[in-house]
Image (spheres, grey):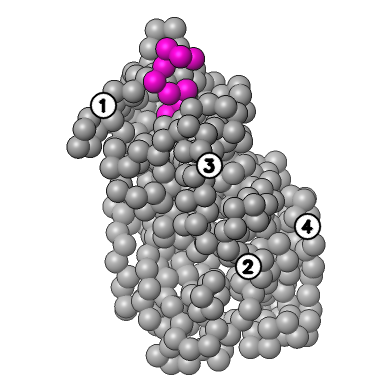
Amino acid sequence: MAEFDFDAVVVGAGAVGLACGYALAKRGLVVAVLEQDVAIGQGVSSRNSEVIHGGLYYPTGSLKARLCVQGRRMLYAFCDDHHVEYDRCGKLVVAETTDDLERLDAILEQARANDVEGMERLTKAQALALEPELSCEGALLSPQSGVFESHAYMLALQGEIEAAGGAVVLATPFEGATPLEGGGFSVRAGGAEPTVLTCRYLVTAPGLSAQHVAGEIEGFPKAVIPEAHYGKGMYFRLTGKAPFARLIYPPPIPGALGTHYRRDLGGQGVFGPDLNYVDEPDYTVDPSAAPAFYSYIRKFWPGLPDGALSPDYAGVRPKIHGPGEAQPDFRLDAAEVHGLAGLVALFGIESPGLTSSLAIGEEVAKRLGL
């Protein structure tokens, strides 16, 4: 492929874009990852829960179900190989009332259908034996869930791409692409030194700007670009001793997994995210949301002291469904969708995208025929 500047160009240096670049680099391709920001992982990847998901909830046969479980297994192995810190602390999905117990049974059945290892149904007494400060009527234990250092993970991916002869090019926004006669793409990149690159393969994984980027690719049919929705989620940090060693999740809410608890790698408790749809990405944390957080958290942790929560940070999820709509699957659109050979365009890569990222990279490579 010597006639091209790069074998592949990936748009977006978040976790998923870097994982796609890594998957292609592992196959011997020379890859350029274009990132509009001045550092890697500054978008969706920098504002999430850093949770490694087990893969419990997702519909049988969906990309989310398959890629989350596969990606989680790959992620722990990658972290071991690259000395990325993680805590496989396990997770409890709790029934806050007896009415929730049937939902736990349904989640357990789904988790087993998804080949999630080690799932256990716990009685109230068993759950409280593990986490004495918890209030619940029963729980599911997912021992494979955990938390990890996502930025160190992304730095390791960048290192792998560069070690294979590729480049992660910062402060270089994607400005458009044109298919070339005979295959491949001409890619226009902006920034302080605008340039044009040619490549055989193009992968777009830019998170919140996925729709805009697809719209700048000549010949990409507008009709297949899903509508963008922004799902904002705020987090509050706990002052004082972390109450639980494990992740604590209530049953999922429509469109998301709900406000949950995690103990971060520094040992502090963090709660979030909630879900509010916004017109534009907005990262402010509204202190007036605190009463709703207290009320929600006290359903599973009645011992939460007054005044113990402080506003922390907010993230925005790149959703492709609006309020009240069913949560769709990941979109990894190849030529059979948009008609452009050598291009895979990613849409709606929200949770569990971080956990799934290495498996998403493998799936993208497969869809490119590699």
* Image depth: mark 2 or mark 4 in front: 2
C-alpha separation, residue under disc 3 versus residue under disc 4: 29 Å
Q: Quick one: label 2 or label 4, which is nearer the N terminus?
A: 2
Asked which secondary structure carries label 1, the reply is: strand
Locate residue 204 relative to residue 109 in the image: left or right: left
Q: Residue at x 65, y 56 (%)?
A: 80
According to the picture, the residue beneath numbered tag 4 turns out to be: 117
Whether residue 251 can be seen here:
no
Residue 268 placed where, x, y %?
Answer: 50, 79
Q: Residue at x 78, y 75 (%)?
A: 122
According to the picture, the residue beneath numbered tag 3 turns out to be: 160
Asked which secondary structure carries label 2, the reply is: strand
Q: Quick one: label 3 or label 1, which is nearer the N terminus?
A: 3
The amino acid type found where label 1 is placed reads: Thr
Q: Quick one: label 4 or label 1, which is nearer the N terminus?
A: 4
C-alpha separation, residue under disc 2 versus residue under disc 4: 17 Å
C-alpha separation, residue under disc 2 versus residue under disc 3: 23 Å
Q: Residues within 10 Å of mark 1 (few under 14, many from 20)?
A: few
The magenta-colored residue range is: 1-9
The amino acid type found where label 3 is placed reads: Glu
Tell me whether circle 1 and circle 2 mark residues in contact (CB < 8 Å).
Answer: no
Locate residue 157 relative to residue 306 in the image: left or right: right
Give the camera-side residue of 135 and 150. Answer: 150
Which circle marks residue 264 in the picture?
none
Q: Residue at x 50, y 57 (%)?
A: 152
Q: Quick one: label 1 or label 2, which is nearer the N terminus?
A: 2
C-alpha separation, residue under disc 3 versus residue under disc 1: 24 Å
Tell me whether circle 3 and circle 1 mark residues in contact (CB < 8 Å).
Answer: no
* Residue 6 painted magenta: yes
According to the picture, the residue beneath numbered tag 2 turns out to be: 87
Which circle marks residue 195 in the picture?
1
Q: Residues within 10 Å of mark 2 (few under 14, many from 20)?
A: some
